[in-house]
Image (cartoon, rainbow, N blue to C red):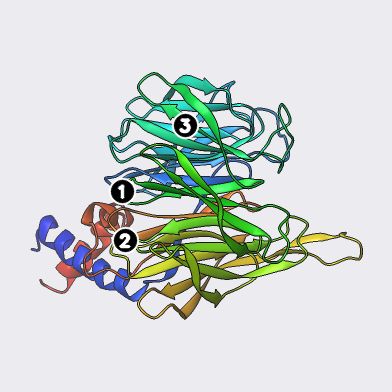
């Protein structure tokens, strides 16, 4: 008779081939909270934290979902009075804390990842909508998009620096372009690139560059973006990729990604994608970028009948800077996208569907710990069939 361990080994080997065949397809859809936005993944690729923005103001709907990436289920939902339209989640290099920006208030919430509980808040911001941390884990840079207790949404013009040892803002606010929507830090931690949405009009968006050694800034150093929404820097630090979403009024509609040369600090190429490129993430080996297309437009006259349709994800080959097949269908209004540190899966938050789509990426090997739960239910049946065959 065949032994259970042998059957499991065979089944997992078979599952590995199946997953290889399913690369660049959605293999799971995880229901989360209301209007999910930013996603952060732990360094061991086992858990993800999703900021549920709760844009429609559902009572007690401002939460963070903790996803178990082995089973692709919600392990815990974190609620706290400090959450106010949580928008992004950033995990520190040590993997001990997560920082959640509250886009409708003046605070950043701190979560202890060992217990998945809120352990504090940092105040003094204005509609914070993004946060990056220096490689040594001592400082954070937070962009102020503008909120109801400050200049108003889209009217912010600053970035704050936070001492993460004391959880306090240090120094004066750094002036950047209007409506800073996102930011990214170079792999060596030397520069922070801040994209400013401004009006969302064609070529009105900018990038300001902060030198982290002295926090000096090159204000609006690079121009020519159209409603820039997200930014990702390649692992080698040579290029930044910026999604051009277009106007928040959904007209004009953006359809491109701009490539910025980090050395020249100029736009070196533009790639045409789907409707409203939103989130972007680059694989750990720097080979590909995955871009979510929000696909939500007005179908009526005078900005009426706002309609979301099935969103998509495009793949960019970063060696040739060309879009390659396939176009991956996800749920409605996909925004943020994150790739696991092991490079095996991408996770897309679908704003209007209240879900996260899981995409299997091309990989030579897959983590068997991820595969085991999906196929354990088939194990007894497989053993029975092997035994019936006399194996």
Tags 2 and 1 touching, CB below 8 Å: yes
Q: Position of residue 179 (x, y in %)?
A: 66, 46
User: From mark 3 to mark 2, how far is it between C-alphas?
Assistant: 33 Å
| 83 to 384, vertically: above or below | above
Provide the residue designation for mark 3: 161
Q: In this orientation, does residue 76 appear?
A: no
Mark toward the start of the polypeptide (2 vs 1): 1
Q: What mark, if any, has residue 344 been given in the picture?
A: 2
Q: Does dot 2 land on a helix, a strand or a loop? A: loop
Judged left or right of residue 108, residue 188 is left
Residue in view at x 36 percent, y 71 percent: 23
Q: Position of residue 226 (x, y in %)?
A: 65, 63
Query: Where on the picture, by quarter, is residue 239?
Result: bottom left
Q: Does dot 1 land on a helix, a strand or a loop? A: loop
Q: What mark, if any, has residue 45 been given in the picture?
A: 1
Q: Does dot 3 land on a helix, a strand or a loop? A: strand
Q: Position of residue 228 (x, y in %)?
A: 60, 58
User: From mark 3 to mark 1, how far is it between C-alphas?
Assistant: 28 Å
Q: Residues within 10 Å of mark 2 (few under 14, many from 20)?
A: many
Judged left or right of residue 29, residue 310 is right
Q: Which one is nearer the viewer's eye here, 313 or 123?
A: 123
Mark toward the start of the polypeptide (3 vs 1): 1
The mark lying in front, picked from 3 and 1, is 3
User: From mark 2 to mark 1, how far is it between C-alphas?
Assistant: 9 Å
């Amino acid at each position: 008779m065949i032994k259970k361990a042998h059957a499991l080994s065979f089944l997992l080997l078979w599952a590995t081939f199946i997953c290889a065949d399913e690369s660049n397809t959605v293999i799971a859809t995880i229901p989360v909270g209301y209007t999910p936005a930013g996603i952060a993944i732990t360094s061991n690729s086992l858990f993800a934290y999703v900021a549920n923005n709760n844009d429609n103001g559902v009572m007690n709907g401002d939460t963070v979902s903790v996803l178990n990436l082995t089973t692709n289920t919600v392990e815990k939902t974190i609620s706290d009075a400090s959450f106010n339209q949580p928008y992004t989640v950033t995990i520190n290099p040590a993997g001990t804390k997560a920082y959640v920006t509250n886009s409708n208030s003046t605070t950043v919430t701190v979560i202890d990842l060992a217990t998945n509980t809120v352990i504090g808040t940092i105040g003094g911001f204005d509609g914070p909508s993004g946060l990056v941390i220096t490689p040594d884990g001592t400082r954070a840079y937070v962009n102020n998009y503008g909120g109801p207790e400050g200049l108003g949404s889209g009217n912010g013009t600053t970035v704050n620096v936070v001492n993460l040892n004391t959880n306090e803002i240090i120094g004066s606010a750094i002036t950047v372009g209007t409506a800073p929507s996102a930011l990214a830090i170079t792999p060596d931690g030397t520069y922070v690139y801040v994209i400013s949405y401004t009006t969302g009009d064609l070529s009105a968006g900018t990038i300001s560059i902060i030198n982290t050694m002295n926090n000096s800034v090159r204000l609006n150093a690079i121009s020519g973006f159209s409603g820039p929404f997200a930014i990702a820097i390649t692992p080698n630090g040579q290029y930044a990729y910026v999604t051009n979403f277009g106007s928040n009024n959904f007209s004009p509609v953006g359809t491109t990604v701009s490539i910025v040369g980090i050395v020249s600090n100029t736009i070196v190429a533009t790639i045409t994608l789907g409707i409203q490129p939103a989130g972007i993430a680059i694989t750990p080996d720097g080979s590909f970028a995955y871009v979510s297309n929000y696909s939500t437009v007005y179908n009526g006259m005078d900005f009426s009948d706002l309609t979301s349709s099935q969103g998509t994800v495009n793949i960019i080959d970063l060696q040739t800077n060309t879009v390659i097949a396939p176009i991956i269908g996800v749920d409605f209004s996909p925004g943020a996208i994150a790739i696991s540190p092991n490079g095996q899966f991408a996770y897309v938050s679908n704003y209007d569907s209240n879900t996260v789509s899981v995409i299997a990426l091309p990989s030579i090997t897959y983590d068997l710990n991820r595969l085991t739960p999906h196929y354990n239910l088939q194990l007894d049946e497989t053993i029975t069939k092997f035994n019936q065959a006399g194996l």
